[in-house]
């Protein structure tokens, strides 16, 4: 199983970052993989979205992160972990809030 992330590049604070994950096994999309994320701000880590999320029939799941309140110029790592049939995979991406 593989997981990959593709965030948009909104970098200005007070916008939304869209995180997408694609989960595959044997080059085929995995439907129903249970996923969770850890968003590591400078002073705290959030689990978003609350309760986790799951991939659809295309193996893709997305969620959004509000950048409001994030510290300027500090990278915010986002780690997504997905599990399916006793196998798990993780992927990481990051965004850096900037002043407009």
Image: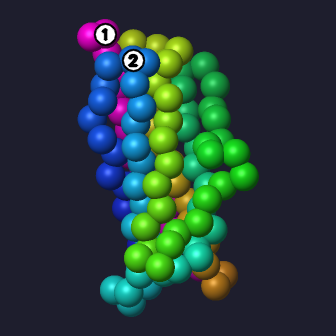
Is residue 88 covered in magenta? Answer: yes
Q: Are marks 1 and 2 in contact (CB under 8 Å)?
A: yes
Q: Quadrant of the C terminus?
A: top left
Position of residue 39 measured from the top left corner of the image (x, y, whole percent): 55, 38
Disc on res. 82: none
Circle 1 residue: 99
The residue sitting at 50% across, 48% down in the picture is 63
Q: Choose top left, top right, bottom left or bottom right for residue 58.
A: bottom left
> What is the x, y in percent for residue 95?
36, 33
Q: Is residue 43 above or below residue 33?
A: above
The secondary element bearing badge 2 is classed as loop
Q: Residue at x 40, y 25 (%)?
A: 15
Highlighted range, magenta: 87-100
Bin the neighbour count of mark 2 within 10 Å (Cα to Cα): few under 14, some 14-19, many 20 and up.
many
Q: Earlier in the sequence, mark 1 or mark 2?
A: 2
Q: Residues within 10 Å of mark 1 (few under 14, many from 20)?
A: few
Q: Would you name the residue on which mark 2 appears?
A: 13
**Quarter holding residue 82:** bottom right
Side (left or right) of 37 relative to 78:
right
Q: Nearer the viewer, residue 97 or 87?
A: 97
Residue appearing at x 63%, y 32% in the figure: 45
As rendered, which of 10 and 89 lies closer to the eye? 10
19 relative to 82, above or below:
above
């Amino acid at each position: 199983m593989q997981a990959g992330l593709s965030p948009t590049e909104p970098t200005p604070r007070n916008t939304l970052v869209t995180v997408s994950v694609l989960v595959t096994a044997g080059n085929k999309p995995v439907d129903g993989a249970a996923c969770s994320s850890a968003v590591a701000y400078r002073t705290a880590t959030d689990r978003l979205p609350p309760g986790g999320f799951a991939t659809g029939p295309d193996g893709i799941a997305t969620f959004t992160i509000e950048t409001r309140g994030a510290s300027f110029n500090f990278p915010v790592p986002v780690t997504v972990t997905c599990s399916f049939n006793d196998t798990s995979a993780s992927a990481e991406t990051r965004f850096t809030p900037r002043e407009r």
